[in-house]
């Protein structure tokens, strides 16, 4: 029996961009499936060099800041009003650094999921994550759904999640990741596939490697994944890929026609980061949205 997943509260940071619009539509469809309460959060940032001091508090710049705040409030109030008409929606405006405010607000309000686009652009779409999204992924300890896929038009039409792929590294957090993915699959009546990447090995010429090393490695890893599934009492298909983790998981998601890929969040690194280098690479290369748990 798999755990029941609750996505009662979804946080959607918005910046009124076209990329963010598609993410918002995706969030609306997801919220309908889970009957979630959606909070639209807009962070009003100050431009560098325009910090107001006491001397100009009553001056023209104070009026400029007030106009900006009023304009942001109007935009936030009107943002996808029709698209969210059947949902429980809260609209919040805060001030400060975008990433810091998103992380602080998400932790304080204890959201179940944060949904953000990557904001990669042009030729660099698969090379970069938007700085705000990258910082949130680095600092937050709440599941985050993001992906290059969310920046493209028409994504809301394909929001129905019918094929979920869960990437397992067989480390200490694998049980948590698997149960989260299984809960999502159970709630949406979706097919769940547990995927594991078998590292590739390079040998100096044919015949130098151990006999049948590839078959033996896959057999051993398949047995380990099966053991984890039994331990968690979860029924899922098993799929193995070989090679580098980002490319292998991207290939697996494409072969399995995944609607979402669930990955683990690495243990806290020395610099405080919560998402490994592989994690960023997976998000950049995945053909579908990625949830980092």
Image: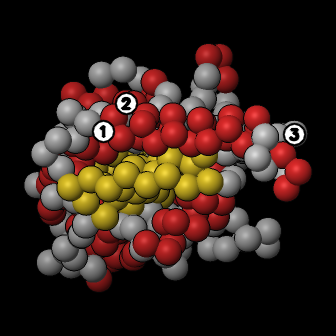
Q: Is residue 160 left or right of residue 244?
A: left
Element at label 1: helix
Cα distance in 3D space between marks 1 and 3: 36 Å
Rate crowding at label 3 as few (under 14), some (14 to 19) or many (20 or more) other CA atoms within 10 Å: few
Q: Position of residue 20 (x, y in %)?
A: 45, 34
Choose between 236 and 33: the one closer to the eye.
Answer: 33
- Most extreme residue toward the front is 58
Question: Who is closer to the viewer here, 227 or 131?
Answer: 131
The residue to which callout 3 is attached is 49
| Marks 1,2: beta carbons within 8 A | yes
Residue 279 at x, y percent in the picture: 59, 52
Q: What is the distance, in whole Å, between disc 2 and disc 3 at their CAs?
A: 32 Å
User: Residue at the spot x=67%, y=74% of the render?
Assistant: 268
Residue 22 disc label: 2
Residue at the disc numbered 1: 26
In the displayed structure image, the side of residue 180 where residue 280 appears, left or right:
right
Is residue 267 toward the left or the right of residue 56 in the image? Answer: left
């Amino acid at each position: 029996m798999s755990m029941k997943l609750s996505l009662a509260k979804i946080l959607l940071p918005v910046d009124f961009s076209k990329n963010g619009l598609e993410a918002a539509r995706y969030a609306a469809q997801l919220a309908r499936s889970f009957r979630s309460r959606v909070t639209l959060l807009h962070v009003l940032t100050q431009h560098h060099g325009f910090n107001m001091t006491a001397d100009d508090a009553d001056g023209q710049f104070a009026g400029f800041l007030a106009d900006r705040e009023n304009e942001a409030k109007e935009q936030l109030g009107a943002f996808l009003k029709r698209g969210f008409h059947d949902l429980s929606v809260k609209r919040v405006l805060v001030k400060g650094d975008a990433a810091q405010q998103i992380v602080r607000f998400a932790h304080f309000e204890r959201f179940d999921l944060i949904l953000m686009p990557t904001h990669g652009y042009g030729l660099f779409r698969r090379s970069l994550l938007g700085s705000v999204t990258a910082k949130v992924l680095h600092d937050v300890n709440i599941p985050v759904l993001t992906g290059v896929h969310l920046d493209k038009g028409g994504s809301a039409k394909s929001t129905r999640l019918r094929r979920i792929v869960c990437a397992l590294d067989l480390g200490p957090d694998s049980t948590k990741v698997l149960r989260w993915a299984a809960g999502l699959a159970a709630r949406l009546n979706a097919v769940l596939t547990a995927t594991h990447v078998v590292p590739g090995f390079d040998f100096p010429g044919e015949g130098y490697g151990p006999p049948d090393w590839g078959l033996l490695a896959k057999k051993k890893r398949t047995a380990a994944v099966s053991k984890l599934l039994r331990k968690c009492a979860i029924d899922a298909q098993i799929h193995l890929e070989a090679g580098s983790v980002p490319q292998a998981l991207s290939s697996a998601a494409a072969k399995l026609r995944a609607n979402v890929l669930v990955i683990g969040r690495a243990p806290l690194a020395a610099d405080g980061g919560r998402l490994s280098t592989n994690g960023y690479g997976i998000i950049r290369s995945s053909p579908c949205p990625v949830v980092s748990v």
